[in-house]
């Protein structure tokens, strides 16, 4: 590569502006670390008049980012537009076909179109770098693709969405309900006006699909991720989890099983003694388990202008210094098919919470139903009797390890009981080395 590496930035929102500012402020440091001057020469965004905190004088401005991607004078294309298709996809594809390396923070694009784009990158002898797409400022992509390259990875576990972690932390600390805390998160700027991607687990699922591909050398497969968000998590369940010695976290988990790779995003209970249970607020964390290194936990800020720009620039520096790697750690043609493990065969402990009318014989019927499905109880909590005879009481059952199919079958039968005042709540209890 030339002594001066020319950067084109498509998208000048929060992260795009932060990236341009970081490249300018740390120019000398980056030159020392890459061995080359790194200079932004061209940009593209929708609004040319907006004040972004830096001057665009001297930069080539493109109204259409596709034209920027085809600019022969640009060495590295930085895509910060967002979205899994449309212009973001066109820009990346055009840049790769024109022999340019691509740096992106676009997790949806990598999760949904990564396999296709990796083939194009390999064919043109360039790469796609996307550290900023997963867990913001935490260098988890580099850890999997380089630092742990000598290990067979058995499991990846992550708090991958800071909005959800903030909501669950605040609900626990202040005893408030989901809707109330979500509204506060929106006011603070931690949640979007439409929070669907965050609170319904989609954002975390995009990131998990990418991590699974890196960890296990398989084609990225977003559709293989079973996704459940946090809307149904109640303040009562968070309180009861604390009594049992657990905390509720929205976790993305990908692991090797004899049947294939299990990938899921859902609220789970984790022991309060584990490191990941102590990751609070808007912070992210990723726990990796390698056969030689054992458990490794990375923690930091998962979003925001500065952490995400930091990750973008780290990728730029690597490319400028000639440190490149295949998109998912191995050449695209060597990625294996993602064999999906059936979630019904998942084995683990479970939390079951019932709200039942306080009547004789109810618990006997519940325990008999669990036994019929081969589910054994580890413990049970019932907080006394209802204030009025025949009133509603919460009952919590912790089940020993069993299969998802057995537990789901038992809960389906229990849900039909007339003694329920509301549907049962079922949650997995997750244990891991860290």
Image (tube, rainbow, N blue to C red):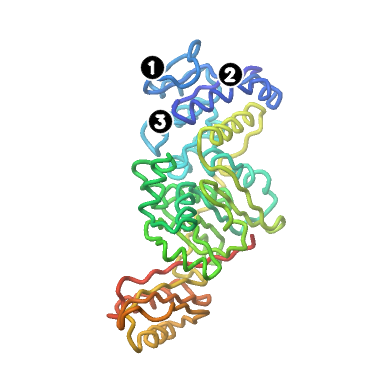
214 to the left or right of 403: right
The image's mark for residue 90 is 3
Residue at (60% x, 45% y) in the render? 140
**Is residue 351 something one can see in this rendering?**
yes
Comes first in the chain, label 3 or label 2: 2
The image's mark for residue 139 is none
> 240 or 265: nearer the eye?
240
Q: Are marks 3 and 1 in contact (CB under 8 Å)?
A: no
Residue 192 screen position, x and y as percent: 38, 41
Q: Determine the residue located farthest toward the left in the rendered image.
A: 418
Residue at (48% x, 15% y) in the render? 56
Residue at (42% x, 20% y) in the render? 67
Question: Element type at marker 1?
Answer: loop
Q: Determine the residue located farthest toward the top in the rendered image.
A: 58
Give the Cα separation between the discs numbered 3 and 2. Answer: 24 Å
Q: Which residue is mark 1?
A: 49
Residue 172 screen position, x and y as percent: 48, 58
Residue 422 screen position, x and y as percent: 31, 71
Q: Which residue is mark 2?
A: 39
């Amino acid at each position: 590569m030339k002594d001066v590496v020319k950067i084109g930035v498509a998208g000048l929102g929060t992260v795009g502006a932060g990236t341009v500012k970081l490249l300018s402020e740390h120019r000398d440091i980056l030159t020392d670390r890459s061995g080359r001057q790194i200079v932004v020469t061209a940009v593209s965004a929708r609004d040319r008049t907006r004040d972004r905190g830096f001057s665009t004088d001297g930069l080539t401005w493109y109204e259409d980012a596709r034209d920027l991607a085809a600019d022969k004078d640009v060495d590295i294309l930085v895509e910060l537009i967002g979205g899994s298709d449309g212009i973001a996809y066109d820009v990346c594809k055009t840049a790769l076909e024109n022999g340019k390396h691509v740096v992106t923070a676009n997790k949806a694009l990598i999760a949904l179109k990564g396999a296709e784009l990796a083939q194009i990158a390999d064919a043109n002898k360039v790469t796609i770098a996307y550290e900023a797409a997963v867990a913001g400022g935490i260098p988890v992509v580099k850890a999997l693709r380089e630092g742990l390259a000598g290990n067979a990875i058995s499991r990846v576990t992550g708090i991958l969405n800071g909005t959800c972690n903030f909501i669950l932390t605040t609900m626990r600390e202040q005893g408030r309900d989901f809707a109330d805390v979500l509204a506060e998160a929106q006011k603070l700027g931690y949640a979007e006006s439409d929070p669907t991607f965050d609170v319904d687990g989609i954002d975390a699922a995009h990131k998990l699909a990418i991590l699974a591909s890196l960890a296990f050398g398989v084609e990225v497969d977003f559709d293989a991720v079973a996704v459940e968000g946090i809307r149904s998590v109640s303040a009562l369940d968070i309180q009861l989890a604390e009594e049992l010695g657990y905390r509720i976290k929205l976790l993305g988990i990908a692991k090797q099983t004899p049947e294939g790779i299990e990938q899921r995003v859902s609220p789970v209970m984790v022991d309060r003694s584990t490191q990941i249970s102590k990751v609070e607020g808007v912070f992210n964390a990723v726990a990796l388990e390698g056969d030689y290194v054992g458990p490794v936990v990375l923690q930091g800020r998962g979003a925001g202008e500065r952490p995400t720009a930091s990750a973008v620039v780290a990728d730029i520096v690597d490319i400028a210094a000639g440190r490149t790697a295949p998109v998912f750690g191995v050449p695209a043609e060597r990625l294996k098919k993602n064999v999906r493990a059936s979630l019904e065969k998942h084995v683990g402990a479970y939390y079951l919470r019932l709200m039942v009318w306080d009547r004789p014989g109810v618990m006997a019927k519940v325990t008999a139903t669990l036994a019929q499905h081969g589910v054994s109880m580890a413990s049970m909590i019932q907080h006394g009797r209802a204030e009025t005879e025949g009133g509603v009481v919460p009952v919590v059952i912790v089940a020993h390890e069993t299969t998802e199919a057995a537990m789901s079958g038992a809960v389906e039968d229990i849900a039909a009981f007339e003694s329920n005042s509301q549907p049962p709540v079922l949650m997995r209890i997750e244990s891991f080395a860290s």
